[in-house]
Image (cartoon, grey):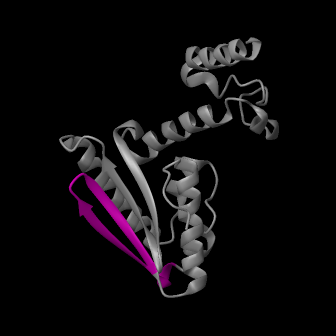
């Protein structure tokens, strides 16, 4: 029973701290930056997810709460799919489409600063994707509720890098998409 109250206290505390929960975490450095010990925080996933979504809002130009991401693996690469949760939300749908065209263009030129800014680290595989930019095809495709970027390559080394990149996204964004 005592542990149940502790859990309720931690959960309530995290809720009341709101957006500052990550900065106020006792496992962080004094300046609020993330420390290596931060991974021991019982609320680590919750405030990391909140921080990720806040950075995503800024970098992508739309609310992460209004959309659904999917990162799908294919035999020759994969697919990044972003769609509005509300099929009538034209503003978000247009913002998604603009963003996904930028993703296609940036990735085609070997620029992976956008995912770096969202995740505060360079995703696995992006170094090979950057180096092999001329071997990768990026195709933009609109859907009824958003857009997708289809990524493909002939080289198995590059395909592995694309899969590593997409698996990282699946895990970080907690999409539940298959990792195989």
Residue situated furthest bottom in the rendering: 154
Residue situated furthest front in the rendering: 1
State which quadrant residue 143 falls in: bottom left
User: Observer-nearest residue: 58 or 1?
Assistant: 1
**Residue 80 as seen in the image, left or right of residue 120:** left
Predominant secondary structure, magenta span: strand
Image quadrant where one finds the N terminus: top right
Q: Is residue 28 above or below residue 18?
A: below
Residue at 57% over, 85% down: 156
Q: Is residue 163 above or below residue 17?
A: below
Q: Position of residue 41 (x, y in %)?
A: 74, 31
**Residue 158 as seen in the image, left or right of residue 146:** right
Q: Position of residue 87 (x, y in %)?
A: 21, 44
Residue at 27% over, 54% down: 146
**Residue 25 as seen in the image, left or right of residue 103:** right
Is 136 one of the magenta-colored residues? yes
User: Observer-nearest residue: 132 or 50?
Assistant: 50
Residue at 48% over, 57% down: 177
> What is the span of residues highlighted in magenta in the rendered image?
133-152
């Amino acid at each position: 029973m005592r542990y149940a109250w502790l859990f309720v206290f931690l959960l309530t505390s995290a809720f009341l701290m709101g957006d500052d929960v990550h900065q106020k975490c006792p496992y962080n450095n004094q300046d609020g930056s993330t420390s290596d010990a931060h991974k021991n925080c019982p609320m680590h996933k919750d405030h990391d997810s909140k921080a990720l979504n806040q950075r995503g809002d800024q970098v992508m130009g739309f609310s992460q709460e209004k959309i659904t991401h999917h990162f799908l693996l294919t035999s020759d690469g994969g697919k990044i799919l972003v769609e509005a949760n509300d099929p009538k939300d034209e503003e978000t749908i247009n913002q998604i489409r603009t963003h996904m065209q930028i993703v296609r263009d940036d990735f085609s030129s070997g620029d992976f600063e956008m995912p770096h800014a969202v995740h505060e680290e360079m995703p696995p595989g992006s170094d090979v994707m950057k180096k092999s930019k001329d071997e990768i095809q990026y195709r933009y495709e609109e859907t009824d509720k958003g857009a997708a970027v289809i990524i493909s390559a002939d080289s198995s080394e590059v395909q592995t890098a694309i899969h590593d990149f997409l698996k990282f996204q699946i895990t970080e964004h907690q999409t539940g998409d298959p990792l195989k």
